[in-house]
């Protein structure tokens, strides 16, 4: 073992490589650029492809074309770019194209502050698609998560044929940290399930008991149709309400019904605590310090760190919050994910701490809310 | 060779639509070239040209408006062996202009067929980027105010090595398409035709008019020579093959002992060019060499070579939680730009904080103990002040030791750079200690 010094964006890139990523396209944007830089170093010498698109729309478009040709693809951007991605995100959701999309969040709105962190895109990532279908969003807390959750993101994109977001933050992505790479507990690499040679194939046909269509690449012996239009199992446009309803329901079900398989979280339990702090991303680190500081005091608190943000891991949140009277939520925006807690935990007192000034939320601020509400 | 048209999905264009003639011409071209369905991908844009993928029984990809070339580029980079044909109208040309220009510049082996009928047929005949100024279209007077685009001249200027204009009604359309598809690189064919559903209702346009108008336009032959070059995908793979794989991330083994336990925060305040971020990295590497966790954040303007440069470093024998600076053990102040950036923090420093300050740098009043170093008097270059400050810190056995600093230098620099750095550091430290 030994420690490696790496920034979050480098860890995302190495995690992508470990997951089998062989195609990256991006458009430079602070604070995501170092992912592109790293992928450009890593991919081409290994026979992979790394492209710089003329804009963000092209970059994700390259990825969607390559993904349908069988490649494992990733793109990375920040707020202004994720806005431009949104039409292509809707396409990837509705047409079941596997892709990992990294959003290194910076302070918005709009071009905002290129070098200031925030978690201001948390609701946007879920709701930026036309149609309002679920997406998977994973939020790394540190450099280790950047590596591991990116690997998980690839596996989930492959398994569920959908875009998977890494909701990073400048404060994690551009912070260099030590990481014990050899000590990581790496997940098994998962590839998309392909249609069996001896079975009939429809591009969006789903086997009995399955919620995800088998994949065949564009360019294989059997013809593949991909379309952004509302389609039936054969990949042709359809106007039949029963077919449309079935498809939409399946797109909803395939993630929501499987959420327990990818509910990632950490917790720090303190006996005698009547408050549960819930946090995600870089703010979870300040929350950890705050919870430890009050551990010996009268107002003790436990901590739940959510790493899967969307679909909302409702069962986990309900179960973990059950023993507590009060929940404290801290996040680097003016109140986004707390809405999900308010929706779920109707019988709890919920105290919220939000901040949007380009600075980290400090442990002392969270401690203050734990102790004084 | 059999037709590649989809026998289950016969074309359903408006009666008299030029698109249908292009569809059959494309099928004949593909048959003539002996291409099998599995070797062809039709990538279609939005609008009436977006129906092409449905009417062919080949691989098909239909996506968002104006973006067809982006998907096609991804497909071709993933599968260089496929024939990738993009169908797009004059609408897609306008909305996806950046992708058209970039495809021309890139010269990736795609064929772009522009089914140019001078208006947006599907949405009611509004003006497009190719609508003549004197045409009557569904956009009121707006098209009078904008000059139509000759995409062929634009594409040639953008570097497309194969650019051609042709009428839908030209007897040589099939040959024209074959030659574009066979071309090894990006080919664009601007195919003029009639939209009977919308355009011809209020505008006089006939195959003869089209032929006459095409004949008046500048010749395009020169682009084939001036823009001739290696196809992008092949050039990409040739360049990539020359690259050496990047090494694995370095593992830093523990070789030293840290002088203090716990969490230690260091802030380095300087200006651009003072290698502040390198100093921060060295401190992290030094920490790692002592088995400590380390974290570094840097703050500098988006423009480089002037302004502040600040680095926040945390070393800790336990996992680092909060990565912000609360109570620094050490502040290294080397330039007013950096000091101004953290003025507020400096006023709150505790008496336990050690400040290493370059002579001439003013600090706000604070309680910290201060070591002043006259780098200029020692003839140390500004770019080396941060490194020497780390050596001064190591002399104090605060945060890091000289062994840790040496280990960091060894990790960060090659042998030659390392020797130079060590010599410079040792000379400076000896000289400073004498005073």
Image: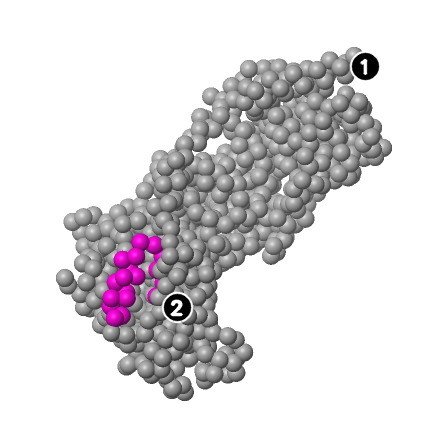
* The furthest residue to the left: B1
Mark 1–mark 2 distance (CA, rounded to whole Å): 81 Å
Left or right: A192 in relation to A89? left
Location of mark 2 (residue): B219
Identify the element where label 2 is drawn: loop
Left or right: B163 in relation to B410? left
> Dots 1 and 2: beta carbons under 8 Å?
no
> Which quadrant of the structure image shows residue B41?
bottom left
Q: Which residues are magenta?
A: B172-190
Q: Is residue A310 visible?
A: yes
The image position of residue A7, as x and y in percent, is 54, 35
Q: Is residue B168 above or below residue B40?
A: below
Could you say which disc has been placed on residue B435 in the image?
1
Callout 1: 10 Å neighbours few (<14), some, many (20+)?
few
> Which quadrant of the structure image shows residue A252?
bottom left
Identify the element where label 1 is drawn: loop
Task: Check residue B243 for magenta coloring.
Answer: no
Check the residue under mark 2 and report the chain it is in: B
Left or right: A355 in relation to B72? right
Check the residue under mark 1 and report the chain it is in: B
Task: Check residue B185 for magenta coloring.
Answer: yes
Q: Residue at x 52, y 35 (%)?
A: A143
Q: Is residue A355 above or below residue B95?
A: above
Q: Is residue B289 visible?
A: no
Q: Residue at x 69, y 29 (%)?
A: B383
């Amino acid at each position: 073992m030994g420690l490696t010094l790496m920034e979050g964006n480098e860890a995302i890139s190495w995690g992508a490589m470990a997951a089998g990523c062989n195609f990256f396209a991006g458009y430079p944007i602070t604070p995501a650029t170092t992912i592109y830089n790293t992928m450009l170093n890593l991919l081409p010498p290994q026979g992979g492809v790394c492209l710089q698109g003329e804009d963000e729309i092209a970059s994700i478009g390259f990825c969607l074309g390559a993904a349908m040709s069988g490649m494992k693809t990733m793109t990375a951007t920040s707020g202004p770019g994720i806005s431009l991605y949104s039409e292509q995100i809707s396409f990837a959701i509705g047409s079941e194209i596997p892709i990992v999309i990294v959003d290194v969040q910076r302070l918005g709105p709009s071009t905002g502050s290129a070098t200031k962190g925030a978690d201001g895109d948390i609701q946007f990532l879920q709701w930026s698609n036309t149609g309002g279908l679920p997406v998977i969003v994973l939020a790394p807390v540190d450099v280790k998560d950047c590596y591991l959750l990116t690997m998980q993101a690839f596996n989930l994109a492959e398994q569920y044929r959908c875009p998977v977001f890494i909701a990073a933050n400048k404060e994690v992505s551009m912070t260099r940290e030590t990481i014990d790479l050899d000590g990581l507990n790496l997940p098994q690499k998962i590839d998309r399930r392909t249609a069996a040679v001896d079975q009939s194939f429809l591009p969006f046909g789903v086997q009995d008991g399955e919620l995800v269509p088998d994949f065949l690449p564009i360019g294989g012996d059997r013809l593949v149709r991909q379309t952004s239009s509302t389609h039936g199992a054969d990949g042709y446009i359809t106007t039949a309400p029963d077919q449309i309803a079935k498809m939409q329901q399946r797109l909803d079900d395939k993630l929501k019904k499987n959420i327990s398989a990818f509910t990632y979280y950490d917790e720090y339990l303190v006996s005698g605590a009547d408050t549960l702090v819930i946090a995600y991303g870089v703010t979870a680190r300040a929350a950890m310090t705050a919870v430890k500081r009050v551990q010996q005091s009268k107002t003790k608190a436990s901590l739940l760190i959510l790493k899967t943000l969307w679909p909302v891991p409702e069962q986990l949140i309900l179960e973990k919050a059950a023993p507590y009277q009060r929940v404290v939520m801290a996040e680097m925006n003016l109140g986004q994910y707390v809405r999900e807690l308010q929706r779920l935990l109707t019988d709890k007192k919920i105290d919220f701490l939000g901040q949007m000034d380009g600075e980290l939320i400090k442990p002392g601020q969270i401690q203050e809310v734990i102790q004084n509400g | 060779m059999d037709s590649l048209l989809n026998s289950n999905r016969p074309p359903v264009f408006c009666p008299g639509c030029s698109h249908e003639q292009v569809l059959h011409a494309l099928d004949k071209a593909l048959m003539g070239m002996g291409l099998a369905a599995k070797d062809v991908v039709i990538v279609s844009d939005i609008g009436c040209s977006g129906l092409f993928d449905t009417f062919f029984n080949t691989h098909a990809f239909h996506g968002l408006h104006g973006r067809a070339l982006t998907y096609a580029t991804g497909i071709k980079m993933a599968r260089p062996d496929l024939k990738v044909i993009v169908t797009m109208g004059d609408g897609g040309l306008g909305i996806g202009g950046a992708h058209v220009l970039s495809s021309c510049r890139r010269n990736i082996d795609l064929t772009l067929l522009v089914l140019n009928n001078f208006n947006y047929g599907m949405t009611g005949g509004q003006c497009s980027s190719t609508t003549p100024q004197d045409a009557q279209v569904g956009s009121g007077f707006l098209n009078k105010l904008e000059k139509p685009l000759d995409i062929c001249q634009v594409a040639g200027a953008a570097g497309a090595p194969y650019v051609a204009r042709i009428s839908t009604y030209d007897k040589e359309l099939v040959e024209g398409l074959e030659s574009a598809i066979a071309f090894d690189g990006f080919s664009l064919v601007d195919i003029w035709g009639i939209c009977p559903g919308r355009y011809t209702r209020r505008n006089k346009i006939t195959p003869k008019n089209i032929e006459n108008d095409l004949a008046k336009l500048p010749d395009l032959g020169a682009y084939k020579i001036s823009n001739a070059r290696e196809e992008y995908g092949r050039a990409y793979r040739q360049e990539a093959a020359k690259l050496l794989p990047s090494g694995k991330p370095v593992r830093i083994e523990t070789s030293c002992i840290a002088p203090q336990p716990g969490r230690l925060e260091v802030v380095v305040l300087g200006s651009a060019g003072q290698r502040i971020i390198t100093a921060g990295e060295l401190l992290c590497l030094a920490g790692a060499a002592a088995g400590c966790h380390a974290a570094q954040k840097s703050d500098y303007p988006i423009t480089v070579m002037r302004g502040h440069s600040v680095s926040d470093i945390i070393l800790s024998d336990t996992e680092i939680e909060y990565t912000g600076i609360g109570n620094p053990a050490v502040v290294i102040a080397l330039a007013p730009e950096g000091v101004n950036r953290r003025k507020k923090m400096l006023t709150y420093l505790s008496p336990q904080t050690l400040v290493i300050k370059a002579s001439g740098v003013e600090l706000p009043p604070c309680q910290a103990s201060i070591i002043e170093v006259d780098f200029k008097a020692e003839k140390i270059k500004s770019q080396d002040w941060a490194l020497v400050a780390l050596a001064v810190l190591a002399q104090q056995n605060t945060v890091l030791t000289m062994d840790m600093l040496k280990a960091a230098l060894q990790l960060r620099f090659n042998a030659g750079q390392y020797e130079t750095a060590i010599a410079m550091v040792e000379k400076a430290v000896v000289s400073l200690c004498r005073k």
